[in-house]
Amino acid sequence: MYGKQEVAFAWSGTLVATDESGNTREKTLAGGLGVPGDSFIDSADITKEDAVSWIEASLDLESIKADLESQLTVFKIIKFE
């Protein structure tokens, strides 16, 4: 495709929030990277930094983090009070 082999178009992963007591909440995420422009990085040359920057650019990461933190707060209230 696009004159290349092994082109990345999608990603998936899990974001995990952990509080000071070790309680965790997870959010499974997945998305598309869109149709690439003229520049390609061969799959063998994609670094962790490349992948993280593409994923973070496609997310409202602050909102997701706030949601996970809120879930941990609710968990504390329900579990301990």
Image (cartoon, helix red, strand yellow):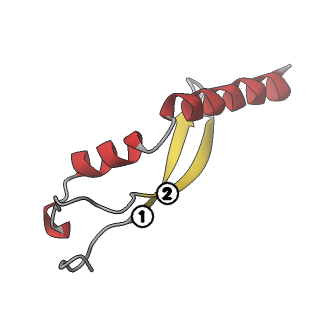
Percent across and percent down for residue 33 are 39, 57
* Residue 52, horizontal then vertical, whole percent: 32, 46
Q: In this view of the protein, can residue 31 be seen by the observer?
A: yes
Q: Is residue 9 left or right of residue 68?
A: left
User: Mark 2 to mark 1: distance in Å?
Assistant: 6 Å
The spot of residue 49 in percent (x, y) is 23, 45
Residue that numbered label 1 is attached to = 10
**Residue 81 spot, x, y in % from top left:** 86, 19
Disc 2 crowd rating (10 Å Cα; few below 14, some 14-19, many 20+) is few
Residue 69 vs 47, above or below: the answer is above
Q: Nearer the viewer, residue 48 or 23?
A: 48
- Up-down relation of residue 44 to residue 19 (above or below): below
Helix, strand or loop under label 1:
strand
Per the image, the residue denoted by label 2 is: 31
From the viewer's perspective, is 4 left or right of 12? Answer: left
Check the picture and name the quadrant holding the N terminus.
Answer: bottom left
Image quadrant where residue 74 sits = top right
Q: Amino acid at mark 2?
A: Gly
Q: Secondary structure at mark 2?
A: strand
**Disc 2 vs disc 1: Cβ atoms closer than 8 Å?**
yes
Does residue 22 show up?
no
